[in-house]
Image (tube, grey):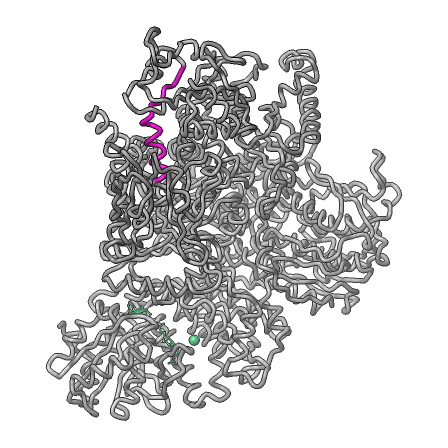
Amino acid sequence: MAALSETAPDIHKVSVLGKESIHCGFHLIPYISSTVLRTLPASTYVLVTDTHVAKLHLTAFEEAFSGSRFLTHVIPPGETSKSRQGKTDIEDFLLANTCTRDTVILALGGGVIGDLVGFVAATFMRGVRFVQIPTTLLAMVDSSVGGKTAIDTPHGKNLIGAFWQPEYVFIDAAFLETLPSREFANGMAEVVKTAAIWNETEFASLESGSADIISAIQTPSTSFAGRHIATRTPAQSLLLSVIVGSISVKAHIVTIDERETGLRNLVNFGHTIGHAIEAVLTPGALHGECVSVGIILEAEVARQIGILAQGAVGRLTRCLASYNLPVSLTDPRLASLPAARGLSVGRLLDIMRIDKKNSGSEKKIVLLSRIGATHEPRATGVADDVIRKTLSSAVRVVPGIPSKNPVTMATPGSKSISNRALVLAALAKGTCRLTNLLHSDDTQVMMNALIELQGAKFSWEDNGETLVVEGGEGRLRPPRNNKHLYLGNAGTAARFLTTVCTLVKQDQTPETATVITGNARMKQRPVGPLVDALRANGSSVDFLESQGCLPLAIGTGGFKGGRIRLAASVSSQYVSSILLCAPYAAEPVVLELTGGAVISQPYINMTIAMMREFGVSVTRDTDPETGKPLGVYQIPSATYVNPGDYSIESDASSATYPLAIAAITGTTCTIPNIGSASLQGDAGFAKGVLEPMGCKVVQTATSTTVTGPPPGQLRAIGRVDMEPMTDAFLTASVLAAVATLPPLPGRELRDGSTPNTTRIIGIANQRVKECNRIRAMIDELAKFGVETKELDDGLEVYGKSVSGLREGVSVHCYDDHRVAMAFSVLAAVIRGTILEEKRCVEKTWPNWWDDLQNKIGIQVEGVELAPSSDAHAGPSSSSPPEYDPSASIVLVGMRGAGKTHIGNLAASALDRKFLDADAYFEEKHAKVISVFVRENGWDAFRAAEKAIFDEILETNPTGHVISSGGGIVETPAARESLVAWGKSRGPVVHISRDIGEIVRYLGEETARPAYGESVEDVFKRRQPWYDQVSAHKFTNDVGAATRTEEEVARFFKDITGTNSEPATSPASDKRTYFLSLTYPDITKSFSVLDDVTTGVDAVELRVDLLTLSGDPAIPGSVPPPVEYVASQLASLREHTPLPIVFTVRTVSQGGVFPDDEEEKAFALFDLALRTGCEYVDVEISWPESRIKALASRKGSSQIIASWHDWSGDMKWDGAVVKEKYVLASKLGDIVKIVGKATTIEDNFALHNFATSVARKPGAKPLIAINMGLEGQLSRILNPTLSPVSHPLLPTRAAPGQLSFAEIQSALHLIGKLPAKKFYLFGSPIAYSMSPTIHNMGFEVLGLPHHYSLLETPGVDDKIRAALKSEEFGGASVTIPHKLAIIPLLDSVSPHAQAIGAINTIIPRAKPDGSRELFGDNTDWLAIRECVRKNIKNINGQTTALVIGAGGTSRAAIYALHDLGINTIYLFNRTIASAHSLARVFPDYGIAVVDTLEAFPGSSPSVIISTVPAFATTSTPGNDGTLLLPASIFSSEEGGVVIDMAYKPAETPLLRLAKQVSNWVAIPGLAILLEQGYLQFEAWTGRRAPRSLIEKTVWEKYQSNN
Ligand SMILES: NC(=O)c1ccc[n+]([C@@H]2O[C@H](COP(=O)([O-])OP(=O)(O)OC[C@H]3O[C@@H](n4cnc5c(N)ncnc54)[C@H](O)[C@@H]3O)[C@@H](O)[C@H]2O)c1
Ligand SMILES: [Zn+2]
């Protein structure tokens, strides 16, 4: 070791309980070992640590202690180790290693290790010596000091323990260099807390030092730097002094109050509420994170009571936030935790009830009176109502006359002035004391950014009332570690900082950029024109995401100056931004404003006036001829000079609220520090708006007093241009809402407007503020029943008497402070008004609700909103409408998308009428549409079209499928009709089709009017409208029209809720499976789809794997477009009848979809619902509220709420899985949890978990799987929707996945799938193909069953024995037993009864569990299926011919009737048999014919022959055989012919059919196969592997013939 390190390190010692046992410094390991070995002699030293710490630091200790008996024991990290078991394990280790009473135990680690090892030491051999070597900040400043030790039990944390003082606590701050930053922040919460209650100086150094302190732990110290003062960096010194300071306070308190009576409670500041939060959020949130929020909430309690000033709350907030700690429950890090939904106010209060500080039922909270001091030297009792009000997210205002009338109050400092003053003071030379600075997000963000840019130093005086700014004279540096400056939603800060950052200079290369960014909303707010101007001036500014918005990367090339042109019609803040920085440009600046009217000139004037107060004079050019001021400003090069003191004027926009309350309640309010001399435009509100409304306004240069008329006597204003005070328009609007008296004389509107009209103009910019404020006011006023009208640059409000307004309105505030405060004015007179997001006022007036109550005298109550009301997503988030099941369905979509084709198919599937709105139109107007348009123009057509459409809907509300014209969505009125229909009357379906296909198709037809623009453009314009008016989407995939009809039927039956065969119900007893299709292009799967899906119940479309290119997807790359996914989905539907699992798997959950593309993911989920995917897999890591909103409109789809743990950390008996399960159960219809197995036991744990949750009432079906080879057992045992693979697939979807067949074999081996015996009963049957069909099926599916022939002349004992056997699985029945078998059966299907024959026996369970034998007939189903698949259209005119009158023809007739064929010709050589058969089915329209040469009606389009082939011929002259004339095939549309005889392969009938071009000939073998599949499916509940069986059977058949 180097010489230096051998000398004693520099140590700070802190004494606790009279002993200097706490030693603090850097790189202390050698010091620790030498001190311990020297002063604590022992036979054995045992060091206990956890695996994390061991990996990093154990070797160093082993080296340092070499030479003594030094044992180490490493345990798993985390709170779970702090248990009885954990204690026992250590004790066993000590005993096994024969440790005795003189052992010294060293606890190296965080609080977990300290608490646990301390407790072991306290009782081992009745107590042994121990040493704390804390390695987390929390352990250093908190848990290691005071001697408290403990373990947890399932009943709670720290319930068993002891006081046991360590011999030493060695605080080696170098350990913090390896500590994860979140753990560091965790400890900082305690550090900040300790300073806040005890020592303002310490607090101030924490406030200003965050960047240094964080850098001290982020920069690894090499060569033991810091061990000696000489090598200690300033940042290290600061870090150590902060730690020592914090420890000293705790040690002091502990020493004077060892047993925690009163004083010691002070260290519980933030912990009363913090602990309650922690109880809910643990383990997702750390203790310090919860305490951080608790500190703010408890400070707010003190503020509410009137003990603590807002300034202090602001300081606490900023300070904690600067250490990356959450400061509110809405912080996304907390709010996104699944457990966060348990954070109800009631729950938190409940938890607080059992706090040990309480006395009786009253809760105790440490109340701060200022930074560094508490209200009492102990915790103070606080009423529940007070706490509730602070905790609630919403407020209800209690209307009444302000009890403090007449009110005099100063409102918070102006935001505009505060922001400007901050920039000016920071850029200036010298020191400036700013008073009445607004403590808000905006100023906080601005200060933080200026600190990060090292542009100025800030400190507080007068208990935070005064901000002392030491200006940096415009010298700014890039933020350390390339940190991005996060500006939240602080618009002013963003605009000002954009130019400020161009001043950032970098001395050394490499050139870096300053990145400023914000939240999602900020990223939509424009800064484009400002950036354009700066770029044109030579600064380098890049948009990192969307053009024109944050985030920006601003280069260090400097600010050039000279002539700058700026478009200033969107925001005056661009102008101010440049003006403020202009003196520091390289050259004097001439700023020229372009682009029409400049917005908000007063703000520009304010900037210039303030610049003058900081020593820089701007001159504005004037027109030499007229003398009028021009939009050209000259700014000299200069350095600002701080004026020493600067008092910030109250915010005039904020002042409008108390003044408006005076106006609306008829009381008086004085604002003492804003008057006519104010720089703020909104200072004109009293004179410009309140006076004309009938208020008495007295304004001096520096004060304003308003007295309202008696309640109900406000006047409408007529027209008011609020351009000079745009922010105040919201306040004006709520007053106008109750202003019923006519305007003052001279202000009346003389344009026919009603006298209660207030027309506010000049405020178009308010559409691009925190929200679209004009829209917000219109929407929220409407809730009260107030009518308004939107104007281009404002709105009209029509006043209504207060008594006519709706009470109990819940106002959504759009996270906009002005919306919230404006509506609290209205709430002061209307009962029950709730402001939903009370915290949004924090932007400019954080204590508004407290001031409303304490300074104005209007009571405010806390309200907790029902969780559902957090969804403001509009109508789409409400639950799906319940329609009349027969409600007419409206189709919308592009011309050429196939509305008519699909509509017709849908109508026939649903047995409804199809109605084409275009045809209806042409009929009604007796004109084709193109002519109508030519004669009357498009507008007239659209109007007429809508009228007719409405008429169609009114006259055909049920029983129809209605196709609308493609352009119907072009007019808002028609869209409204459609939306209204979809909302409550019936479904609206968007029929969509690939635009390329549409163009190709439209190219072929000319009947309809031309668009006059490209079809693509029309498509682009209309597409969003179609989606807007429809809740369902059917993609017409014409290219692959193989099973369009079935798919149309499925889709439309689904949306009308008439599907008798819904998707596999996961609740049934049957094990279910789905196959993952892991293709980048799903069409590539079609060649094997039938084979690979054999046996499974659904297919999964892995949407995240799809790519436009068809190449394998790259994790995290751009997701596939929605339209592409729609077409892939549609093609898949065309190729499989199986339900679809629609899955978008994210990178963090094992897929490739980017984790941060929430919008795109939900657009895809939306598609899944619209297209009726049966299952939609949604990961529960997406925001809960979004999943809920999605689930609320899922229709017949089922949501699979899924969670995948790829870390392998999740334990099936742990807390995490429970938490995920609870959340997933809440969000989904099916829960899917996937873990990882490393041992076979992991599967047992999974199984135990699954069985225990399944026992709970109302448990949702659970898919629980372990990944990995070791997890295969879990796949075998999982009962519901187990994911399976198939050997023919290119890749397996997940490691350890098994095929369906593999799982079946495994189930058999473990006794869960007994082998069954199947038979064919009949005679002669030796050549039957049935054994081939079924045994092949069993084999392919991995089923252990066997099918064999049981040939008997009659129904005898052999058959009876077979039926009785336990192993009996089912039987086919053929001649001659089809009738004779019936008496042996327990029940027979109605079809078989009608046909009078059985061909299938199925054993099935009765409700009581016993077995019954059920007889069915699959022949008719096979016939029906083969006809249906091959015939184009069946209608009333369709006829069929059946040849033969035996048993099989009964099945044929039954099938034809079922298909809706009303005329069946029946021919039989013995005509009497034909007649007697016809009598069996009297209502079936059977016409017995005596010749095949001619028919009584139209020629048949279905022909079924049931006579043996050898008995027929197609060549005349063959006596004794039936001559089949070619004329039977004369139906014009062609048709289907089936010959039930299956020998020879080509019968005379089929040969004949093949000579006619448009007939489909079906051999008997096809029917045999089909009925065999149906039997197989009835027995096994699994789809037969059809194509494989078919191939094998045909091969065998051909080789036999
Ligand atoms: N006795 C008391 O007075 C008292 C006071 C406060 C808290 N506590 C207890 O302290 C415990 C929490 O302590 P904690 O926050 O230190 O948690 P912890 O001990 O679990 O440590 C946090 C994490 O950091 C890791 N870690 C520790 N030091 C590290 C280092 N230097 N480098 C890298 N990783 C490191 C740990 O392995 C662990 O994963 C709780 O059980 C709490 O009840 C006790
Ligand atoms: Zn704590």
Among all residues in the image, which is located at the extreme left? 67
**Considering depth in this image, is 205 or 669 the residue closer to the camera?**
669
Quadrant containing the N terminus in the rendered view = bottom left
Q: In the picture shown, does residue 1521 fall above or below 130?
A: above
Q: Residue at x 33, y 33 (%)?
A: 1081
Q: In the picture shown, does residue 262 fall above or below 64?
A: below
The quarter of the picture where residue 314 lies is: bottom right
**Considering depth in this image, is 790 or 457 the residue closer to the camera?**
790
**Residue 165: x percent and y percent?**
33, 88
Q: Say left or right for 1316 vs 1384.
A: left
Q: Residue at x 49, y 81 (%)?
A: 266
Q: Residue at x 49, y 86 (%)?
A: 263
What range of the chain is rendered magenta?
Answer: 1559-1575
Magenta residue check for 1440: no
Query: Can I make out residue 190 in this image?
Result: yes
**Residue 20: x percent and y percent?**
32, 88
**Residue 1389: x percent and y percent?**
46, 42
**Residue 653: x percent and y percent?**
67, 53
Query: Can I make out residue 557 in this image?
Result: no
Chief SS of the magenta region: helix
